[in-house]
Amino acid sequence: MTSADADAFTEKLIGVNINEATEAYKASLEGDETSLTSLIEKAADVNETSPENMKDYLTILFLINNFFQKRVP
C-alpha cells in the first residue's frame, strides 16, 4: 500500500488522513489527548456511530495493525 493509498483509506474510514491520525495518537501517548479525542469524535460522525464505539473500533484497528506489522514481512 502506498502512502497515497493509506491516506485515502484512512480519510474514507475516519475522516482524516493517516498523518493526522498518527500525530494525534503520538500526542496522546505523551499525555495530550485533545487531538485524539477530536479525531475520535470526527470519525464517529463520519461513521454515524458514537465516540465510544469509534474508540473501540480504532483500538481494534491499532491492535490488528500492530499484529500484522510484527508478523508480515
Image (cartoon, helix red, strand yellow):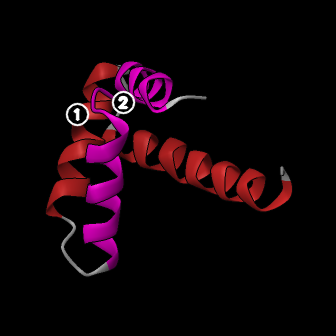
Q: Mark 1 points at which residue?
A: 42
Instruction: Please state which of residues 7 and 53 is positioned toward the viewer in this rendering.
Output: 7
Magenta stretch: give its range: 3-29
Q: Name the residue under label 2.
A: 14
Name which residue type carries label 1.
Lys
Q: Position of residue 50 (x, y in %)?
A: 34, 35
Q: State left or right for residue 22 relative to residue 62.
A: left
Tell me how far mark 1 sits from mark 2, CA to CA: 7 Å
* Above or below for 42 versus 48: below
Residue 24's image quarter?
bottom left
Residue 45's image quarter?
top left
| Residue that lies at the very extreme toward the bottom in this rendered image | 30
Residue for point 40% across, 20% down: 8
Q: State left or right for residue 53 relative to residue 61.
A: left
> Mark 1 or 2 closer to N-term?
2
Check the picture and name the quadrant holding the N terminus. Answer: top right
* Above or below for 70 versus 39: below
- Helix, strand or loop status at disc 2: helix
Q: Position of residue 9 (x, y in %)?
A: 47, 23
Q: State left or right for residue 32 relative to residue 4.
A: left
Residue 1 tag number: none
Instruction: Please state which of residues 44 and 18 is positioned toward the viewer in this rendering.
Output: 18
* Above or below for 1 versus 19: above
| Discs 1, 2 touching: Cβ within 8 Å | yes
Residue for point 38% across, 47% down: 52
Name which residue type carries label 2.
Ile
- Helix, strand or loop status at disc 1: helix
Q: State left or right for residue 28 relative to residue 65.
A: left
Q: Where is residue 44 in the image (x, y as percent from the top left)?
A: 32, 32
Q: Where is residue 68 in the image (x, y as percent from the top left)?
A: 76, 51
Residue 4's image quarter?
top left
Please tell me whether residue 19 belongs to the stretch shown in magenta. Answer: yes
